[in-house]
Image (spheres, rainbow, N blue to C red):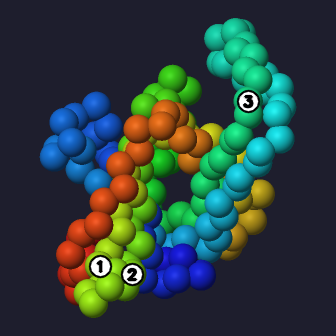
Amino acid sequence: MFKSNNTSELWIATKPQADELEKDYKQIKFITELKHNYNVKKEDRTYFHNKGKTTAITTGVSESLTVSIDYDDEQQAHKYLLKLLLGDIENLNNQFIKVKLKNFSTGTKTADIEITGKTTINFKNHIPSGNADEIVKLQIDFIPQDDAWKISEIEHQEDNREE
């Protein structure tokens, strides 16, 4: 859960190429830190790819969502993230996440806000330093890939969580 709002949730689609109803979102649990990064400064970035290519981009406004989690092999979303980390780097693009912000008051009723969109995943830090008793941690940046993010108000639902 998020430290700042323990009723909010972060989900990732384990089938990002599927149609919207079949993306199979799984909740990312055991979040220890969540930070929204927003920068209006113009900057030049160079991205290095695993096949020796580079891409140079000049950005204007940039933003990302930094998430730190304690890895648990029992969680489907955690296994999916580890599979992405160990797999082909090209699969880190075109992923989909969903953020659910619960219990927003809109006039006379309480609603949940759901934000869904396409993202690129950047793994920052991962796996322990070698101590056998150390908890495995993943630190990830979710970078918005386009401006087609969908924000919707949904009817408030009680805590009937799926894994």
Instruction: Tell me the residue that label 2 is attached to.
Output: 104
Q: From where the camera sits, is residue 136 visible?
A: no
21 lies left or right of 146: left
On screen, 11 above or below 13? below
Q: Residue at x 28, y 40 (%)?
A: 15
Q: Position of residue 139 (x, y in %)?
A: 65, 56
On screen, 137 above or below 140? below
Q: On the image, which quarter does residue 144 sit in?
A: top right
Three-letter amino acid code of the residue under disc 3: Thr
42 lies left or right of 99: right
Three-letter amino acid code of the residue under disc 1: Ala
Q: On the image, which quarter does residue 161 sit in?
A: bottom left
On screen, 92 above or below 128? above
Along the polypeptide, which appears first: circle 3 or circle 1?
A: 3
Q: Residues within 10 Å of mark 3 (few under 14, many from 20)?
A: few
Instruction: Tell me the residue that label 3 is attached to.
Output: 59
Label drawn at residue 111: 1
Q: Position of residue 89 (x, y in %)?
A: 55, 27
- Mark 3 to mark 1 CA distance (whole Å): 35 Å
Three-letter amino acid code of the residue under disc 2: Phe
- Mark 2 to mark 3 CA distance (whole Å): 33 Å
Along the polypeptide, which appears first: circle 2 or circle 1?
A: 2
Q: From where the camera sits, is residue 118 visible?
A: yes
Q: Position of residue 148 (x, y in %)?
A: 41, 38
